[in-house]
Amino acid sequence: MMRCSFWGGLPSALLLGQLATAAPVPSDSARAPTPLPRLTLGLASATRTTYLQRAPEPADDQGYLGTTLTYQAPQGLLSSLYLNHSYNYRKLGEPFINYGELMVGWQSVRDSDTYWTVQYTHLFSYGESALVQSSLHNNFSASVTQFFGLVTASLSADVFVGKAHDVVLTADLSHRFQLPAFAHDTLSLEPTIELGTGSQHFYASSLAQTTQVKTRKRGGTTTVTAEPSSPAFNTLGYTLSAPLTYTAMRYALAFTPSYLVPLHVPAGGSDTAFFYFTLGITRSFW
């Protein structure tokens, strides 16, 4: 899964639609070296909660507020903590913080047209979660991004281990347009297309239905879980987005309209394409 930072536009370890952090990327026409910010705090709010080209049912998803704290060492060490608050938590009986991710990894820091990263992420959820990734606990990922003269191309591979085991490949293609801004600020628009392929046991697990069945013992019952069959390794869907990012000194503000088209959805899942919007802000401290 490709995740874009509000000030870098590169793949990172966090969810689709969430704030993430990666190495800074200069514009296509000016590639002067830029020092990495050591500590960055980000807030993001979205109208839908998406993950690996999947989303909860519309009735169970009113969006989220996400907080990300990221540390980057000049030598390449990368770590972050992400906490998620679902706007639908009162209906589902979830705690205020219903989901989180703890990530550690290593990224390239050389001034080069090729950027890469390897990461391990521990995912944790609380309460009665409607999030499609609630059955996933561990993620091992690697990604590479190549800056060409006209476009930026990225490819990532994710291996998930938990109650569900999945392998997902994600590719995206984007081009950054530099727009007029104040003297020391930057404004950019980066149309992006993202394509996901892989298995989706995690999504089938989120669609599972539980029922109470009587046993032969007097008054006894047992819980039976019925999970839809998961399609084989196949295309998960694609997302069209156009992040608009304004950067001023240590702050960056981004507004991202997105259109997600899910494909090969298991029985009982929603295969309806939809628009959603994300608004985020980051602040670098040093």
Image (cartoon, grey):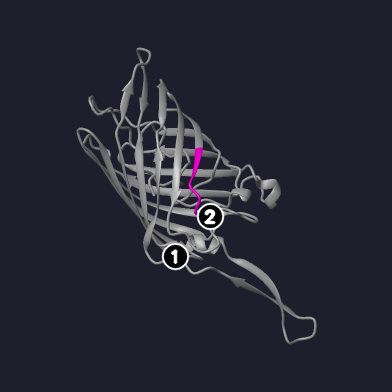
Instruction: Locate residue 211 relative to residue 63 in the image: left or right.
Output: right
Give the farthest residue toward the top: 183
Q: Quadrant of the C terminus?
A: top left
Q: Position of residue 177 (x, y in %)?
A: 31, 26
Residue drawn 29% across and 44% down? Answer: 154
Relative depth, front residue between 241 and 7: 241
> Which residue occupies the foreground of this view, 51 or 20?
51
In the displayed structure image, the side of residue 122 where residue 75 appears, left or right? left
Viewer-closest of 129 and 70: 129
Q: Position of residue 45 (x, y in %)?
A: 54, 36
Amino acid, disc 2: Ser
Q: Residue at x 35, y 38 (%)?
A: 192
Residue highlighted by disc 1: 165
Task: Between residue 210 and residue 34, name the one nearer to us.
Answer: 210
- First along the sequence among labels 1 and 2: 1
Local SS, label 2: loop
Q: Is residue 29 found left or right of 181 in the rendered image?
A: left
**Image position of 167 with respect to 106: above or below:** below
Which residue is rendered at x = 36% and y = 38% of the image? 22
Compared to residue 213, the image places residue 1 above or below, namely above
Q: Is residue 281 above or below residue 141?
A: above
Q: Which corner quadrant of the image does residue 47 belong to?
A: top right
Cβ atoms at labels 1 and 2 below 8 Å apart:
no
Which percent across, then down, holds residue 137? 49, 59
- The question of residue 251 being in magenta is answered with no
Assess disc 1: are there few (<14), some (14-19) or many (≥20) residues with their C-alpha within 10 Å of its C-alpha.
some
Range of residues picked out in magenta? 270-276
Q: Amino acid at mark 1?
A: His
Residue at the spot of label 2: 270
**Residue at 45%, 28% in the rendered image:** 285
Q: Position of residue 218 (x, y in %)?
A: 79, 85
* Disc 1 element: loop
